Amino acid sequence: MAKWETALGEELRQLKREGRYRPLNVWTGGSGTRMELNGRSLLQMSSNNYLGLTDHPALIRAAVEATERYGAGSGSVRTITGTLDIHDRLERELARFKGTEAALVFQSGFTTNQGVLSSILGPDDVVISDELNHASIIDGIRLTKAHRKIYAHKDMAQLETALKESAGCAKRVVVTDGVFSMDGDIAPLPAIVELAERYDAFVYVDDAHASGVLGKNGKGTTDHFGLQGRVHIQVGTLSKAVGVVGGYVACDQLLKDYLIHKARPFLFSTSQTPAVAASCLAAIEVLGQSGELIAKLWENAAYFRSRVQALGFDTGASETPIVPVIVGSPAETMRFSDLLLAEGVFAQGIVYPTVAADKGRVRFIVTARHTREELDYTVEALRKCRDAV
Ligand code: PMP
């Protein structure tokens, strides 16, 4: 029998030598800001649970009721028996929330990007993408035969050049993250929209880290900049601030109809479970009244970032609740993350190839649920770890 050892073992050893080997953390309990890792209670500083909705009573109740009413699974893909009334309502509510004609739900944010990009881009088209866009955007683009142009992070001069150079293409689509997941900075969407309008291109924004975070009640980057009606495709996830799992695209009805017929992850993968669809629906309702929660999130983020910066740490371009502390090499970064763990704080080390080899970082994600004491505790742990290295 063939052995994986010869085929793959050396690659794993190389990852270990470079300090990039990552065993999975197995969480054994807790939720919100305190979670148990192997039975040890830790302060959670790396969850995408921005608004603390994962254990919100309304979401849990909705999941239980839907499971009792419809069962544990939906039974098939959306186009056969897998569209329940709760999926339909979730899409209507998402469209209403985002202020678009329609919305279509996928099983994850990742498959939303893959499914949408691979459907709308053909060989005569061009896609123009920020170099720091998420892996699911990159993979979605790779699935197409479209021409591709990558512009340096947020470099509008390069974006304009790419638009000029692709004048002969049938469709031009500019793709950007709304909030960049590794740096926590915001895309210059007004400038992108202006350029796209000047060169007759479509604008596609992935709001995974902006949904529930930016804009009124967390409507996202488009709302934050007052660009309603000028962004053609808004992708979001239901797994971060919304607190459950899934993804969606908010768009016009025509594109929704098109994707129902073309997007392969939508067509060929079983729909969200009733519990998931119902708790997402409950979460969208909660978001409708989330003004105070979002204000608290931003207050916490500003407080934490300024205290971390006051210790002399480099927080890069962070301007949202994602606060990276740039450490350096993969080995140094993982060691720093381990030292924090010893202090009872979980903050994920993120290293090459996710970020540049010398820009390894411990990525903190501040949530609305963190108390001042918890943020102060984390800052003190950071100070101790800095002194230890
Ligand atoms: N886009 C971005 C910018 C993300 O950060 C993520 C999550 N890592 C995704 C898409 C994928 O979302 P999901 O986790 O819902 O698949």
Image (cartoon, rainbow, N blue to C red):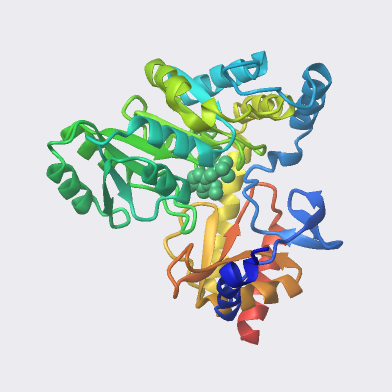
Q: Residue 240 versus residue 7: which sits nearer the camera?
A: 7
Residue 262 at x, y percent in the picture? 43, 25
Q: How many marks?
A: 0
At horizontal 52% and vertical 38% (from top left) the residue drawn is: 111
Relative vertical location of residue 305 with respect to residue 326 in this rendering, above or below: above
Q: Residue furthest top?
A: 85
Give residue 44's quadrant in the image: bottom right
Q: Residue 258 versus residue 290: which sits nearer the camera?
A: 258
Give residue 123's quadrant in the image: top left
Q: Is residue 175 left or right of residue 106?
A: left
Q: Residue 210 versus residue 301: which sits nearer the camera?
A: 210
Please identify the quadrant where the C terminus is shown. Answer: bottom right
Residue 263 at x, y percent in the picture? 46, 28
Relative vertical location of residue 78 with respect to residue 116 in this rendering, above or below: above
At horizontal 80% and vertical 22% (from top left) the residue drawn is: 71
Would residue 345 be seen by someone viewing this image from the given angle?
yes
Q: Is residue 230 left or right of residue 357?
A: left
Residue 315 at x, y percent in the picture? 48, 66
Please identify the quadrant where the N terminus is shown. Answer: bottom right
Q: Residue furthest front?
A: 1
Residue 278 at x, y percent in the picture? 70, 24
Q: Residue furthest right?
A: 39
